[in-house]
Image (spheres, rainbow, N blue to C red):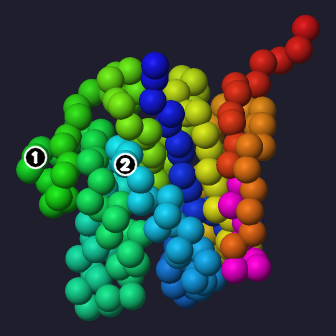
Amino acid sequence: MTATYTFDVFSSLDGFGSYGEGGDWGGYWGKQGPELLEHRLAQYDGDQRLVLGANTYREFVQLLAMSEAQPEVLDPWVTRMRHLPTTVVSSTLDGPLDWPDASVAGGDAVDVVRRLKEESDLPIRSHGSLSMNRALMAAGLVDRVQVTVFPVLTGKTGAQSIFAGADDFDLELLESRTLDGRTQELVYKPTLHRAGP
């Protein structure tokens, strides 16, 4: 039996994973609420393995370092995520990592995740790590795409287009919910789109 792999990502309505220069939105684009934060904590509360790409790992470590000066950055679900057993896929990082239960796996992300899916007794989740997860989707290794859509358009400041350059996929909606009356969480099963005859 292979472990279920969930690609978990935050998005603006226009498909960006963050904002860049000139953006003054703040974390969660300023749209977090108690229901969202409680739901995120519940999602990260069960036993599971986290997989991150090297760039996302570096961004998280930098964000967590800032939390000493800005404690509001360190939401309880982020603390829980940080304490999950974590595999960081990288050809540039060496251990030990500044993460409680993390190890580095060198090599191609597709090979690393395929092995983890075969060997893991725990579900696997990845938050962010956009280019890695696009490659994993193309290889058919992503079982669920969980997109949390915040009610903002970031046309001028949007950065990190989530699915730019991805293959074409058909999506089967598995779950949907509204959090705090404004934020949508959509969970899909992706299937690589095959052109008709």
Q: What secondary structure is marked by label 1?
A: loop
Q: Residue at x 18, y 43 (%)?
A: 103
Q: Which one is nearer the viewer's eye here, 42 or 7?
A: 42
Magenta part of the protein: which range?
180-186
49 up-or-down from 114: above or below: below
Locate residue 26, reporting x and y percent. 52, 84
Q: Is residue 157 visible?
A: yes
The quadrant where residue 106 appears: top left
Q: Which one is nearer the viewer's eye here, 102 or 120?
A: 120
Locate residue 101, reporting x and y percent. 19, 52
Quarter of the image with the C terminus in it: top right
50 up-or-down from 123: above or below: below
Locate residue 172, reporting x and y percent. 78, 37
Amino acid type at circle 2 is Asp
Residue hosting label 2: 47
Instruction: Spot the residue most to the top.
Output: 197
Q: Which one is nearer the viewer's eye here, 169 or 51?
A: 51
Q: Residues within 10 Å of mark 1 (few under 14, many from 20)?
A: few
**183 magenta-colored:** yes
The quadrant where residue 59 appears: bottom left
Which of the two labelled residues, at mark 1 and mark 2, occupies the earlier sequence position? 2
> Label 2 near label 1: C-beta < 8 Å?
no
Q: Residue at x 69, y 61 (%)?
A: 185
Q: What secondary structure is marked by label 2?
A: loop
Q: Is residue 132 visible?
A: no
Residue hosting label 1: 95
Locate residue 86, reporting x and y percent. 28, 47
Amino acid type at circle 1 is Gly
Q: Residue at x 46, y 54 (%)?
A: 127
